[in-house]
Image (cartoon, rainbow, N blue to C red):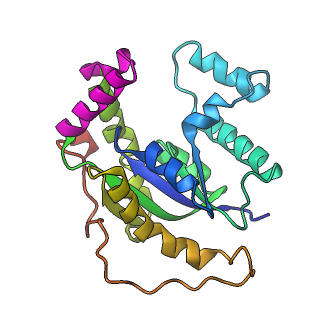
Amino acid sequence: MPTRFQTILLFGAPGAGKGTQGKILGQIPGFYHLSCGEVFRTLDMSSDLGRTFMQYSSKGLLVPDDVTVKMWHQNMHARTVLSDYKPRADLLVLDGIPRNVNQAKLLEKHINVLQIIHLVCPNKEEMIQRLRRRALKENRIDDAKEDVIRKRWEVYEKETFPVLDYFPSNKVREVNATGSPARVLQHILECVVPIQESHFNNPITGERIAPAESNGVRNAHTPRRAKPARRPAAAKR
């Protein structure tokens, strides 16, 4: 078994569509999607880690970074043992982790980040309204409150966005998150398919897959990393 999982990170602000795009990618052979939320939902509460998780969550406290990473790694190990995830054939697609720079550091011994897909939201106010509409449609009244949504953005800008600076800039590809899901997926595939072809063998023949030549289609990413709109001064890079 490889010592580190070959990984693509889906990254972006609340409402950017990380979960949606991750689920779609996970249906494509050769890609395996896992969200941090799914790790928490499937946690065995009778285990040591489960009880530790409950000690924090029952009090409304954030789970420490080292505990979060341990839970994630335990979950990934189980999926590997069950052959649900096959490290030598599948490209791991993560969303929701790492949430901060410290988690990124802790994850280094477990994953080899090949590329980061940054789903960019050019218009913050438009994304906030999109989150409100989605929450109302799903009957999540509390999540539809504007102050709650703005708080999530504030936390993202302060703690999560700086994660991009932790990784080499040449690993970050930017995709406009405001297009249709199909259009966003198209641009994501333009970025990740060459990565998959460069790092894995053909599952049928066992031979190395040669990267496809460029077809001249311009990716949706921008030359420089886009910043969230109206970021607080403390979070400037």
Q: Position of residue 229 (x, y in %)?
A: 19, 45
**Is residue 146 located in the magenta-colored stretch of the structure?**
yes
Query: In this view of the protein, which residue sits in the foreground, 96 or 20?
Result: 20
User: How many discs mark residues in the rendered view?
Assistant: 0
> Within the image, what quadrant is residue 171 found in?
bottom left
**Is residue 29 located in the magenta-colored stretch of the structure?**
no
> Within the image, what quadrant is residue 133 found in?
top left
For the point 20% across and 50% down, the residue is: 122
Most extreme residue toward the right, as rendered? 81
Above or below, 127 relative to 58:
below
Left-right relation of 168 to 52: left
Q: Position of residue 9 (x, y in %)?
A: 49, 55
Please provide the residue range marked out in magenta.
Answer: 125-147
Q: Is residue 73 visible?
A: yes
For the point 35% across and 33% down, the residue is: 155
For the point 60% across and 19% down, the residue is: 56
Above or below, 183 relative to 52:
below
